[in-house]
Image: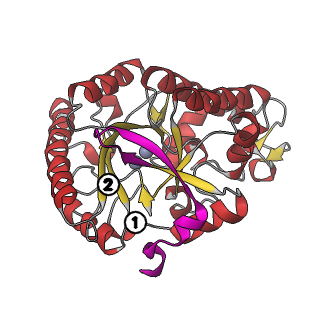
Amino acid sequence: MYSHHSHSGDYVAHGVDPLEDIIAEVKRRKFHTWCLTEHMPRLDADLLYPEEITGAMRAEEDLKTLDKKFEAYMVHAKKIKSREDSSDADAGVKILIGFEIEGCDETHLEYANELLSRNSEVLQYMVGSVHHVQNIPIDFDQQSWDRALQASGNNVRQLLFDYFSVQKKMLEVTQPLVVGHFDLIRLYMRGDLRVDLESGQVLAEGGTFVRDIGSLMTQWDDVKELIVENLQYVVSYGGVVEINTAGLRKGLVDPFPHRDVVELAKVVAPTIKYVTSDDAHGISQVGVCYDKLLNYIENVILLKQIAYLEENGKGEVTVRDISMEEVKKSEFWTIK
Ligand SMILES: [Zn+2]
Ligand SMILES: [Zn+2]
């Protein structure tokens, strides 16, 4: 099996286990390909998460810590990769080294491009992610998500529009090979929010509950149009969309992206390719919810094949297809 997106306790504040322990678990579970994709450093103290802040006047140092951790990550990742590349094929796992970007603004997007070109002997690709709308984190906690909603005029339609606009910019500037958790904005979407079905405005009473809207992503034409543009753009430059089980792990009904996005993609971007990711932050999240993922792919979104990343003879990362029939033959499914 494959994961194209992962973290560890060594290099991200909310990770739980050392990277080496995670790799040991990956090998025990017989992963075919495992991609290391720690977060790029953020450049702005306003973007530090509470868990990264060590003191009121220490913003500069805290930002430097992110920088140092990323440097250390690249050294460590390279070491792991050369070790696994030279180990015997049966025991080994194919390691690729990427990083997850912060698509929050132009400065971070340019920085992501710079990191990739400056460290091209280590970093092989980007996971293109958006974790902020108007610099407010949308996947950290409910309170932050609520603030982002307020910043979008307390309007769900506008919040979605703003999120996918940031994503559009991210895609255009960086053209990431893997697009991370496409519809992450729905992580803290409250089902009990009442909205005006036309405008998307949140209402104190009346209106429609968000949970009763069948397809949130296609409810509003302007939002849908942006999603269509983003999906088509990804296909145009040869990117792939990850199916990320963090959504399932966090209690959503589907992984990212949900079925409404995939159904839309089938119509507007039928050649789009999907890779799988667990976005693991610790040992217990290695391959997390992959049984549900298999069910989702086979029985919900009805894909006959998925894709994965593989190095060609020249060390370049290429996109390969594999049928679900082949995927199911993997020893991975027999090891718990
Ligand atoms: Zn992410
Ligand atoms: Zn991640």
Give SS at disc 2.
loop
Number of numbered markers? 2
Residue toward you, 267 or 149: 267
Q: Is mark 2 within 8 Å of ligand 2?
A: no
Q: Position of residue 85 (x, y in %)?
A: 21, 56
Horizontal arrangement in the rendering, residue 24 relative to residue 162 (left or right): left
Residue toward you, 236 or 37: 236
Q: Quadrant of residue 42?
A: top left
Horizontal arrangement in the rendering, residue 268 relative to residue 105 (left or right): right
Residue toward you, 252 or 266: 266
Quadrant, the N terminus = bottom left
Residue 320 is covered by the magenta coloring:
yes
Quadrant, the C terminus = bottom left
- Alpha-carbon neighbours of circle 1 within 10 Å: few (<14), some, or many (≥20)? some
Looking at the rendered structure, which numbered label has been put on residue 14?
Answer: 2
Give ligand 1's quarter of the image: top left
Q: What stretch of residues is rendered in magenta?
A: 309-336
CB atoms at circles 2 and 1 under 8 Å apart?
no
Colour style of the rendered protein structure: secondary structure
Q: Position of residue 220 (x, y in %)?
A: 78, 32
Q: Position of residue 94 (x, y in %)?
A: 31, 57
| Mark earlier in primary sequence (2, 1) | 2
In the picture of the structure, the residue carrying the numbered disc 1 is 285
Horizontal arrangement in the rendering, residue 139 relative to residue 48 (left or right): right
